């Protein structure tokens, strides 16, 4: 179970890196990259699996308020990344607000994970 937990944390961090890295790489000319979309899905799936593992573990379990906030932020990132990728595929311009929303919400989600103890 420890290896599974570590693997999920590793993939969760890689997902965050894909989102924020893609955001920073295209900061001057904002868009939503394929890797940001993949990172958003990775974050969402691994986050849910990590919560499931935490619920199964002995002890108090996860902080449900924190998990709810992180889930709402992760859904916001995933929806914005999906809309941005759909616009890119159809040849439309991605608005700066949408592109920065993907990276900014992911950055806020990381901050919630780190600073909400």
Image (cartoon, helix red, strand yellow):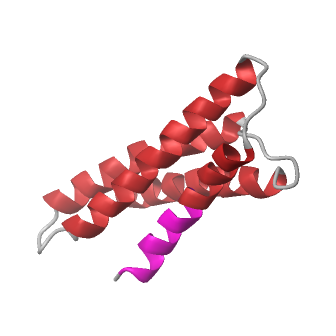
Magenta residues, dominant SS class: helix
**Residue 2 seen in the figure:** no
Residue 113 colored in magenta in the image: yes
Please give left or right for residue 70 compared with residue 11 in the image.
Answer: left
**Residue 51 seen in the figure:** yes
Residue 105, position in %: x, y?
A: 54, 58
Residue 37 lies in quadrant: top right
**What is the span of residues highlighted in magenta in the rendered image?**
106-116
Residue furthest left in the image: 59
Residue 54 colored in magenta in the image: no
Q: Quadrant of the C terminus?
A: bottom left
Q: At 44% from the left edge and 51% from the top edge, which residue is drawn?
A: 74
Residue 115, position in %: x, y?
A: 44, 82
Q: At 16% from the left edge and 68% from the top edge, which residue is drawn?
A: 61
Q: Nearer the viewer, residue 58 or 85?
A: 85
Please give left or right for residue 21 compared with residue 25 in the image.
Answer: left
Residue 24, position in %: x, y?
A: 78, 58
Q: At 61% from the left edge and 60% from the top edge, which residue is drawn?
A: 104
């Amino acid at each position: 179970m420890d290896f599974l937990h570590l693997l999920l944390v590793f993939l969760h961090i890689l997902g965050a890196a894909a989102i924020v890295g893609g955001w920073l790489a295209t900061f001057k000319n904002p868009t939503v990259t394929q890797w940001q979309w993949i990172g958003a899905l990775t974050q969402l799936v691994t986050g849910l699996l990590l919560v499931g593992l935490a619920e199964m573990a002995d002890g108090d379990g996860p902080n449900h308020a924190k998990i709810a906030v992180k889930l709402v932020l992760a859904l916001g990132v995933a929806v914005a990344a999906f809309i941005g990728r759909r616009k890119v595929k159809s040849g439309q311009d991605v608005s700066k607000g949408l592109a920065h929303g993907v990276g900014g919400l992911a950055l806020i989600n990381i901050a919630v994970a780190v600073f909400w103890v």
